[in-house]
Image (cartoon, rainbow, N blue to C red):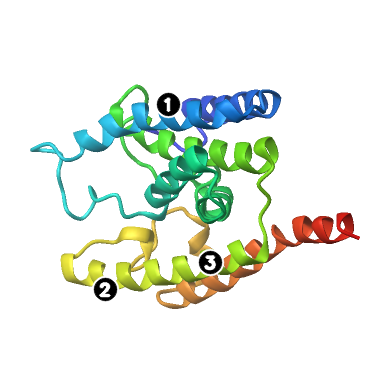
């Protein structure tokens, strides 16, 4: 079984740093579409596998986690360079998705099991896309993208809360906390949801402000 902060986790971290460095070196327009194709080619078979008999479980198999949606946004952003898709990739990918690398909630089989590869593929590819789009291509976050992401996240959370209650699931960890995550610091349900929402809004504002200040200075 996968052990957080064990050998395979350390290798994942090294791979993340190495590929990130390559993406910052090869900052070309075609890199975006190549990365989008690679993501689909690698992750789509895993997603199809979760739909097979014996694997399917409505409480786990639907691609409704924010990390799943962030990966979809990442593919769209890489292919089209859409400001909206790029904003979702940036904010979701460099905060929520990045938590998997720091405090992984995954407790499944270790490498090379398909669940291990799918979990880390979703998270690493999204972070790589966000880094490439922001610092490679140069599509900078702004307050419009910040507001759009806040609204999109709030709408998703409301829908998931209702859906979780109907099907007995816990998509987004909105109905219960995963063990060993940063959410343990935020109190019981539903307090941790309020704290997490306020913290996210603050962190997203902090990672927006430097770019908007730089843009305002350069326009003077």
Residue 211 coordinates in the image, percent (x, y) = 76, 55
| x 67%, y 60%: residue | 142
| x 68%, y 29%: residue | 24
Element under label 2? helix
Number of callouts? 3
Element under label 1? helix
Label located before the other in sequence (1 or 2): 1
Residue mark closest to the camera, 1 vs 2? 1
Which quarter of the figure is the C terminus placed in? bottom right
- Tell me how far mark 1 sits from mark 3, CA to CA: 27 Å
Along the line of sight, which residue is nearer the eye, 175 or 205?
A: 205
Where does label 2 land, which residue?
162
Label 3 CA crowd tier, 10 Å (few <14, some 14–19, many 20+): some
Where does label 1 land, which residue?
38
Q: Which mark is residue 148?
A: 3
Q: Please tell me whether residue 145 is drawn above or below residue 81 in the rendered image.
A: below
Q: Is residue 11 left or right of residue 162?
A: right
Residue 168 coordinates in the image, percent (x, y) = 19, 65
Label 2 CA crowd tier, 10 Å (few <14, some 14–19, many 20+): few
| x 70%, y 60%: residue | 208
- Tell me how far mark 1 sits from mark 2, CA to CA: 34 Å
Q: Please tell me whether residue 186 is drawn above or below residue 46 in the rendered image.
A: below
The answer to whether residue 1 shows anywhere in this view is no
The answer to whether residue 148 shows anywhere in this view is yes
């Amino acid at each position: 079984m996968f052990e957080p902060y064990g050998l395979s986790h350390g290798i994942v971290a090294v791979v993340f740093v190495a590929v990130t460095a390559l993406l910052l070196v090869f900052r070309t327009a075609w890199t975006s579409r190549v990365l989008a194709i690679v993501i689909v080619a690698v992750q789509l078979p895993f997603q199809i596998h979760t739909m097979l008999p014996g694997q399917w479980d409505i409480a786990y198999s639907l691609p409704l986690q924010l990390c799943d949606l962030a990966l979809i946004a990442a593919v769209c952003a890489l292919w089209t360079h859409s400001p909206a898709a790029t904003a979702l990739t940036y904010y979701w990918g460099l905060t929520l998705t990045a938590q998997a690398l720091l405090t992984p909630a995954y407790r499944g089989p270790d490498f090379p099991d398909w669940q291990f590869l799918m979990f880390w593929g979703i998270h690493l590819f999204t972070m790589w896309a966000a880094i490439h789009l922001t610092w490679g291509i140069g599509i900078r976050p702004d307050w419009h993208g910040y507001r759009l992401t806040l609204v999109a996240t709030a709408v998703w959370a409301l829908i998931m809360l209702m859906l979780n209650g109907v099907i007995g699931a816990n998509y987004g960890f909105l109905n219960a906390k995963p063990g060993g995550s940063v959410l343990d610091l935020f109190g019981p349900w539903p307090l941790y949801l309020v704290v997490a929402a306020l913290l996210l809004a603050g962190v997203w504002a902090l990672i927006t402000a430097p770019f908007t200040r730089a843009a305002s200075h350069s326009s003077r």
